[in-house]
């Protein structure tokens, strides 16, 4: 199935505020390894379905996974949120298994879903991957997805700086959980990039084993005045999973948010 119609034709999302409660049995799941959730801009649980593009299934829950106590959810848990051309994604989503502890988390449905999101938000083909903030999740950790995106016309490359000059040659920018914070000049460059129509994809992950870069991502969200923030948690699901509670599966995504 063509990625541009993958989400639009998949059916109606399973659950979440304002989303219907039934889906076709053929609806392909999105697979999220050790995901984190998002919050509202004021730090409370995010329930706005005009912002949330994918929810965990009703059986999911969130828990403490690092040094910080997260905001707890009693209801639907957001996994992907969108504000304008900025997406917050609670997982790497398309990392190669070799870089994901051997877990076969890459799935064709994930690749098609992420490309559909890129199609919706990126006005162009040039997507850069931030390599300047000590990230473990550099572009070389996404070889299968890079090949797929290249076949579909995207030009991927690493960004060796986050400044106005570098971003002038990009239509989209991917930032994975950054161990090193963005400085004020970099935050200003991101704001200018988004203001001129650039697409920004912020990939988060659970704070498991001290991987808590939530504050650095939230500094970006704050500077851009986004409608969402990032939660210092891990989302688990004892029923809808790919073999372990932290390998979360969901079909509760809203096609209208992705395409």
Image: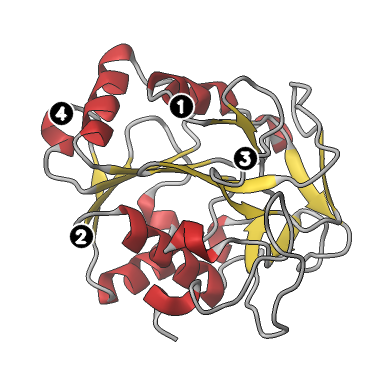
At label 3, counting other C-alpha atoms closer than 10 Å, the crowd grade (few under 14, some 14-19, many 20 or more) is some
At label 1, counting other C-alpha atoms closer than 10 Å, the crowd grade (few under 14, some 14-19, many 20 or more) is many
The image shows residue 106 at horizontal and vertical percentages of 56, 68
Residue 99 visible in image = yes
Q: Would you identify the image quadrant in which residue 161 lies?
A: top left
Q: What numbered label is drawn on residue 221?
A: 1
The image shows residue 70 at horizontal and vertical percentages of 76, 27
- Could you say whether the residue bearing mark 2 is in a helix, strand or loop? loop
Residue name at image x 25 percent, y 30 percent = 162
Distance Cα–Cα, label 1 vs label 4: 18 Å
Q: What numbered label is drawn on residue 48?
A: 3
Q: What numbered label is drawn on residue 164?
A: 4
The earlier-in-sequence mark between 1 and 4 is 4
Q: Is residue 123 shown left or right of residue 73?
A: left
At label 2, counting other C-alpha atoms closer than 10 Å, the crowd grade (few under 14, some 14-19, many 20 or more) is some
Q: Which numbered mark, 4 or 3, is in the foreground of this view?
A: 3
Q: What numbered label is drawn on residue 98?
A: none
Q: How many marks?
A: 4
Q: Which residue is mark 2?
A: 125
The earlier-in-sequence mark between 4 and 2 is 2
- Could you say whether the residue bearing mark 3 is in a helix, strand or loop? loop
- Could you say whether the residue bearing mark 4 is in a helix, strand or loop? helix
Q: Nearer the viewer, residue 172 or 21?
A: 21
Distance Cα–Cα, label 2 vs label 1: 24 Å
């Amino acid at each position: 199935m063509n990625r541009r119609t993958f989400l639009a034709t998949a059916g109606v999302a399973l659950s979440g505020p304002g989303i219907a409660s039934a889906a076709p049995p053929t609806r392909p799941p999105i697979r999220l390894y050790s995901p984190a959730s998002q919050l509202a801009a004021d730090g409370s649980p995010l329930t706005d379905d005009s912002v949330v593009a994918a929810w965990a299934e009703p059986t999911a829950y969130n828990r403490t996974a690092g040094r910080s106590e997260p905001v707890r959810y009693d209801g639907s848990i957001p996994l992907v949120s969108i504000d304008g051309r900025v997406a917050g994604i609670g997982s790497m989503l398309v990392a190669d298994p070799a870089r994901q502890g051997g877990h076969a988390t890459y799935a064709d449905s994930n690749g098609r879903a992420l490309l559909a999101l890129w199609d919706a938000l990126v006005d162009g083909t040039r997507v850069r991957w931030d390599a300047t903030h000590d990230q473990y999740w550099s572009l070389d950790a996404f070889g299968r997805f890079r090949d797929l995106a290249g076949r579909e016309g995207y030009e991927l490359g690493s960004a060796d700086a986050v400044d106005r000059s570098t971003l002038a040659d990009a239509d989209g920018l991917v930032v994975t959980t950054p161990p090193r914070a963005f400085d004020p000049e970099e935050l200003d460059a991101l704001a200018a990039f988004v203001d001129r129509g650039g697409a920004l994809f912020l990939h988060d992950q659970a704070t498991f084993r001290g991987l808590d870069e939530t504050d650095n991502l939230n500094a970006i969200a704050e500077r851009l005045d986004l409608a969402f923030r990032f939660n210092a948690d891990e989302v688990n699901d004892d029923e809808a999973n790919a073999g372990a509670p932290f390998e979360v599966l969901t079909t509760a995504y809203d096609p209208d948010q992705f395409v």
